[in-house]
Structure formats: structure tokens, C-alpha cells
Amino acid sequence: MARSWRLYLFRAVCLILTIAFLRPASHPYNLSWTSPGLVSDGKTVAQVVVAALEKDDVRWIDNGYWDVWKYEADNPNAKHPVPKNKGHEAMIYLTHIIDQYDHLAPRVIFMHAGRYQWHNDDPRYDAKNNLQNLRLKHVDEEGYVNLRCHWFQGCPLAVNLTMAPYLNPLHANPTADFDHLYTSTLRHLFSTLPIPKAVAATCCSQFAVTASAIRRHKKDVYINIRKWLMETEMHDYYSGRVLEYMWHILFGKEAVNCPAADDCYCRTYGKCGLKCEEGDCGQYQYPINIPRLKTWWWKIKHLFG
């Protein structure tokens, strides 16, 4: 009897999980690949700069409109190589800006190679959904737009700079360490820039920016940043993360750049009328346990059609 009860319980749990996996997003949206923000004349409307490794397959990005630039950090013989595999995606982004400074598309989208990643701001963690729903008019209006609207990691505060000058850089506190590293790097790279009290922006180094926003600085500025990135003794994790919370400042936004999540989803992706609280509109959940399994489920479902 006990064995039969356990069997029924197991079947019930499997049924609940299956329903959860197959349940559509709470706010469904257009799943066709042509973005509603794209023109229909067949012209390239943006460069997509992809931070990748040689093994990464990025064909999921190509839809005929994007000019896709795959940079392979670990392959010196790649079509688009980088001078050094250092600083995570920052080396790739800076290399593209430097090499293509005079030939940038009107808009450039910087992103990671993986279609499914924990930080993709989508109910299915699917970057393709983000790309296909991206409102390019909003990018044109803002100059810089982070592809992430959810406030979890980075907003309302990513770096506290008020105490950083007094912190011991060897202090065994990761937050204090990072705040100190960020401040010292900001002073080194932008000595004339007033140090803000705080820095905040949504994570995770995926964003769209206009060519004019990039060119608000001369090419030498980006060359200098890349030189620092190549020469710094800072661990890759920290050097990449320092720049992660510096891109928005570099491209003309205030040090604290945390748009209201509901406005961000509406203007960036056309998902309007969402009910939000403290930067959470129900579009993203940190992938622990079931959400993580759900991510893998969508990978498998996509693989088998």
C-alpha cells in the first residue's frame, strides 16, 4: 500500500513539473524572428558584437538584418580575433569599438554568445526573444540601453564610492574589495571625472548603443581603457566587472542609471502594462532549482523542435 502511494505521488509530481515546464510565459509576446523594431527594406539595421569562444555556435542570432560579428577570445586565427584573452567580454567590446570606430553601424548591440543564460531578462532566459522584441527606436532615443530591465544585480546600488578611499584593498570583504578596485580604476582612467557617491546599473554587460554615443569619446579613450585591461594585474573577474558597471557612464548616462522596470520593459521590448514592485515585473526569476531546470527544458525543446 505504501509503495502504491509513493508511486501515485511520484506521478503527480511529474505531472506538475511537466505542466510548469510547458506553461507559456505569463505575458506572451510575438515569437516571430523579425523584430517589430526593424525596418522592412532588407538593410542591416545594427551590428551585433558577440563575445564568444571558438566552440560557440551563434547562428541563432542571424536573421538577415543583423550584421553579426563573432569575436573568439580563445582563437588568435579567428575572423575577428582579440589581442589578448583577458577581461571577459570587455576585451571584445573594446576591440570592436577601436577597430570599427570609423565604420560603426548606426546601432551596435553587444552581447554574449549563449542563447540561454541565467541573466537573460526573459521568462525563458532566451536572448533570442530579447533581440527579436528590441525596440530600436528606443535605442536611438536613449543612445544607450541595457538589455536587462530587472533590477536584480546592479540596482538600486552596485558600487558604494563614499567609503572606497578609506578601505583597505586587501580587506577580506569582496564587496569592499570591489568598491575599492572600481574607484581606483575610475580615477586612473578618467582622472578629470568627478567621483560619484554611488554607481548603479542593471547587470550583465549586454546592451545596445548608438554610434554617436560611442563617438562622444575619441578613439584614444577606448585604446587607453583596453591598454589598462591588458596590463592590469587585477583578476579577470574583477576587471571585467569593473567595466560592467562603467559602460553606461562611458556612453553618457548618469552614474546611477536604474530606469523604472515597467517603463524599461515597455520602451525596450514593447511589454507594456506590467505590474512591478521594486524592479521586478514578473518577467525574470533568478534560476535556482525549478527555474534552472526550466532553462534546460527550453534548450532541449528547441533542439528537438
Image (tube, helix red, strand yellow):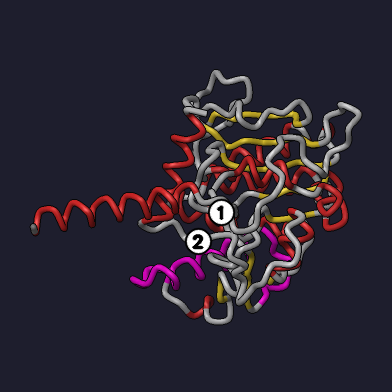
Q: Which residue is mark 1?
A: 123
Residue for point 58% across, 37% down: 51
Q: Earlier in the sequence, mark 1 or mark 2?
A: 1
**Is residue 304 in sight in this rendering?**
yes
Which of 130 and 8 lies nearest the eye of the viewer?
A: 8
**Against 291, is 37 above or below?**
above
Residue 180 location (% of width, % of height): 50, 69
Residue for point 74% across, 67% down: 273
Residue for point 53% across, 81% down: 163
Looking at the rendering, in which quadrant would you find the N terminus? bottom left
Residue 186 included in the magenta stretch of the image: yes
**Against 94, is 268 above or below?**
below
Residue 168 location (% of width, % of height): 42, 74
Which of 87 and 49 lies nearest the eye of the viewer?
A: 49
Q: Dot 1: what SS?
A: loop
Amino acid type assigned to the residue bearing label 2 in the image: Gln
Q: Dot 2: what SS?
A: loop
**Against 183, is 79 above or below?**
above
Q: CA distance from mark 1 to mark 2?
A: 7 Å
Left or right relative to 107: residue 166: left
Q: Which label sits on residue 152?
A: none
Q: Which label sits on residue 285?
A: 2
Residue for point 73% across, 58% down: 271
The number of callouts visible is 2
Residue 39 location (% of width, % of height): 88, 36
Which of 126 and 273 lies nearest the eye of the viewer?
A: 273
Left or right relative to 85: residue 32: right
The answer to which quarter of the image holds residue 268 is bottom right
Residue 218 location (% of width, % of height): 81, 47
**Is residue 257 in sight in this rendering?**
no
Q: Which residues are magenta?
A: 169-196
